[in-house]
Amino acid sequence: MSANLAFQLSFRNILRHRRRNAMLFAAVAVAVLGSSLSMGLVRGWQYDMLDGVVGNLTGHIKVHAPGYLDDPGIQRGFELASDYQPDVPSEDLMGWAPRISVPAVILSERETRGIQLVGINPSAESISFLDKVVIDGENLSGPGDGRMIIGKELARQLKTRVGLRLVIMTQGSDGLTRERGFRIAGTYDAEGTGLEKAYVFSGLQTIQSLLDTENVTEVSIRLNEEPKKLSIQALLVDFFIGLEVMNWEELNPQAAGLYLFTDSIIYIFFFFIMGALIFGLVNTLIASVMERTKEFGMLRALGMNRRTIVLEVVIESVLIMTFGMIFGLVLAYFSFLGLEDGLNLGVWAEGLESFGMRAVLYPIMRVDDFVTIALMSLFMGVLASYWPAKRATRITPLEAMRG
Amino acid sequence: MSGEVVMARGLTRVYQEEAVPVHALRGVDFSLSSSEFVSLSGPSGSGKSTLLNIVGGLDRQDEGIIELDGEELAPLSEGDLAALRLRKIGFVFQAYNLVPVLSALENVEFILQLQGVGSAERKERAGEALKSLGLSELQDRRPGEMSGGQQQRVAIARAIVTNPVLLLADEPSANLDSETTKELMELLRNLNETQGMTIITATHDPMVMGYAKRQVHLRDGTVERDEVVTD
Ligand SMILES: Nc1ncnc2c1ncn2[C@@H]1O[C@H](COP(=O)(O)OP(=O)(O)OP(=O)(O)O)[C@@H](O)[C@H]1O
Ligand SMILES: [Mg+2]
């Protein structure tokens, strides 16, 4: 009953001071828009980074034999049943790829380079960066393909090109050196990243027979949703007994740290922008409450309790916050639509690429970020008004009416 | 028939203002039966408002006993006092009686809303209260669109719509001209005579005093005279 009344009074008072409240409303909308955009851009950067890390042949979860990470080689391979399927709910699984990845040396007529030779099943690599790269020439046709694809940068350094044949040397499962010529089927463009120099790909079966093994050295698993990684990691641990099952954060602690740090940046932005807003909001509410000292005194003299007065002021603040926030979120939504093709960082692009960022940033708005902004705004609306409201009811009705 | 609406014994009230104590009431005895119309008079600072506020549960005495409608007020918590004011007392203040953002009808209605009366009944009773005071045509106006006299009459409508046991009016006509004051006081007298409303007013204005049937004259925080006026 009195809550209804508090609501009615709040609403009327907002309408009564249209100008002042319209400005507050606009300030809230701008602050929400600003926080949404900055959140979205930082998220975009964060996802870009995650995508880079997870797409770097890592996946969300990777399985190795123990010791492989310290001393990668075919001796630290493991057997994978030919009909293996990860025991992961299909709606969570984006894909998985078995690989052999061993250190090797590639020789052209004039140059020699140390590389990582990776045997893949090309159709399984939709989960890695290989799915996105542009390939000059041809891609590998299947796990039995005896040709290779190499990075553009490596091709440049080796002064070679598509169609030529290069020799690769590596160690077989028996510890003896193997050597084989591979024709270059194509060169891939990984946007100048270090990947281009590091990885040379050929068919999984080709490498297995080169190394004299049936084993693989890793299974990489990519999920649809990053946060599920822990629960699914637990499932895989139960399956791959005796092997190391690690998630991307464990495999790349530096990136994981940066990822976490980015999360806090998002909130730092939010609190800065909202903090400035709250400052203005509190001041306006104090003024608006002071103006009504006599009115509140009169209402309390008639028998309205303090709670209802506080409620009135809090509702007033929350209403302004809510409408401003909805408007701000709608603006943010359309801004995101406008930025769907990405925000071109243009002149800074080169500097940023060295931080592992792409030149075009795609803002990402997660529903939970929207919800967080919305809830935090409301919470701040309550916080900002509670104190002025309490202050308004601290004096007795008689004191208030006397003014 | 009529029971005691107010019973006050030995009320004292001392305000501690910057080390100098102000004795606003120095032992006031005062009783009021149902359907009485009393005017508190006396010079400025004699304690009229203080007495009225203690009777109305807005202030507390330092010593003495005050009972309203048979209930002692001293033990009541602040919240209980607010509830008691809401149920039992109709207030008409000197100024700031109405909520600026509510219409006349809504200003009368909201007190019923605070009491928890349902919407339909509220509207009906508020409309009737305004009508009984001849204010129906004002019901959609906000306070800013009414004269001072009209606002005070709406305040009376709000004060009586809850059927209080006591109506308190502290200088209700302080901001009104004499013609409007007359109308207002006739309205109060009429309420007292036709509905048996128990009323206390406090005033300096001899014309206002003239409407009451009983005069309580205060001086320096004590009752100097308490007399029933006979026509
Ligand atoms: N809150 C207060 N703090 C300090 N002194 C007060 C307070 N309220 C009243 N007084 C003092 O108590 C005395 C009685 O005041 P009260 O308001 O009851 O007088 P009054 O008869 O209503 O006067 P008036 O005709 O001017 O309204 C005065 O001296 C006044 O200054
Ligand atoms: Mg007074």
Image: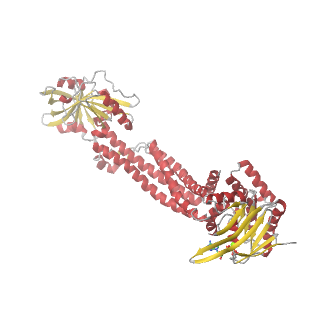
Residue A159 appears in view: no
Residue drawn at x 68%, y 58% is: B84
Where residue B179 sits: x, y (%)?
80, 71
* Vertical position of residue A203 compared to residue A229: above or below: above
Residue farthest to the top? A83
In the drawing, does residue A394 fall left or right of residue A255?
A: right
Dividing the image into 4 quarters, which one contains the C terminus of chain B? bottom right
* Vertical position of residue A27 compared to residue A137: above or below: below
Q: Nearer the viewer, residue A283 or A403?
A: A403
Q: Nearer the viewer, residue A117 or A254?
A: A254
Q: Nearer the viewer, residue B57 or A142?
A: B57
* Vertical position of residue B151 compared to residue A221: above or below: below
Residue drawn at x 80%, y 68% is: B185
Where residue A3 sits: x, y (%)?
62, 51
Q: Residue B132 sits in which quadrant?
A: bottom right
Q: Residue B81 sits in which quadrant?
A: bottom right
In the drawing, does residue A178 fall left or right of residue A380?
A: left
* Vertical position of residue A153 compared to residue B62: above or below: above
Residue A180 appears in view: yes
Where residue A128 sits: x, y (%)?
31, 34
Where residue B192 sits: x, y (%)?
81, 63
Residue drawn at x 74%, y 64% is: B6
Q: Quadrant of ligand 1?
A: bottom right
Q: Nearer the viewer, residue B149 or A41?
A: B149
